[in-house]
Amino acid sequence: MNFIVMALLLLSAAALQTLQPTLVFMGQAKAPLLLAVTLYYALRREKSRMLLAALLAGMIQDGTSLIPMGVSSACFAVMGLVVSRFAHVVSSDHPLSLSLIGGGAGVLLCLSLWAWLSWSGAIRYGAGWALTKTFWTAVLGMWTAPLVYIAACGLDGYAGNILTRESVSDIEP
């Protein structure tokens, strides 16, 4: 069931990320839904499953955009490893910490992709465009990370992959 849930999360995130409209004043930023799936696996599951999610999410993102294959996978994997390293320190059930992680990861993703693609000559956008897109990607990441985390926890819990709490009264003192 673990792989089925991961596939469903990645395909849903890919469809929503690909089909969402972009606005020019936002630097054509999109909500980083595939990154949010990777962050969920970094916070909630073991590293091997997170690396698989990062690899698949990156391949999907690169395949649905003009990014050369492997670039997004590398960025997702590095961010996932950093987040998973500090997962025990962060209260991953709190929306504020999820928003901060989503926003920070959105900034790092956008800047690293822009730097990598600019250096390789694949794009020719200036720093002003990159900063605008980075800002809006961070804002969208702050909204999407908690929503994806809640949805993924619910789906994983429903499938029986993880234990979930029904209410606060289920916790023994």
Image (cartoon, rainbow, N blue to C red):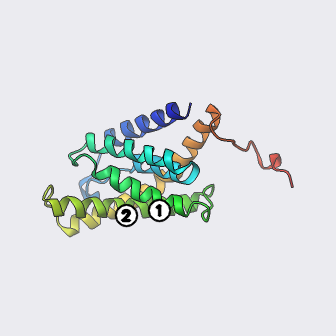
Query: Dividing the image into 4 quarters, which one contains the C terminus?
Result: bottom right
Q: Is residue 94 visible?
A: yes
Distance between the alpha carbons at the discs numbered 2 and 1: 14 Å
Q: Quadrant of the N terminus?
A: top right
**Mark 1 falls on what kind of element?**
helix
Q: Which mark is residue 18?
A: none
Q: Which residue is mark 2?
A: 107
Type of amino acid at the residue the image marks with label 2: Val
Front one among 116 and 155: 116
Q: Are marks 2 and 1 in contact (CB under 8 Å)?
A: no
Up/down of 18 relative to 109, above or below: above
Estimate how packed mark 2 is, as few (under 14), some (14 to 19) or many (20 or more) residues with alpha carbons within 10 Å.
many
Name the amino acid type tagged 1: Val
The label shown at residue 82 is 1
State the residue at coordinates (55%, 49%). 46
* Residue 80 coordinates in the image, percent (x, y): 45, 56
Report whether 78 appears left or right of 127: right
- Identified at 13% across, 60% down, the residue is 124
Q: From what the image shows, is residue 50 above or below residue 86?
A: above
Query: Which residue lies at the image location 59% right of the left edge and 38% below the top edge?
Result: 156
User: Does residue 64 appear anywhere in the picture?
Assistant: no
Residue 78, given in percent of the width and then of the height, sits at 40, 58
Give left or right: position of 170 versus 6. Answer: right
Picture coordinates of residue 167 (x, y %)?
Answer: 76, 45
Q: Position of residue 114 (x, y in %)?
A: 24, 61
**Disc 2 versus disc 1: nearer the observer:** 1
Residue reaching furthest to the right? 173
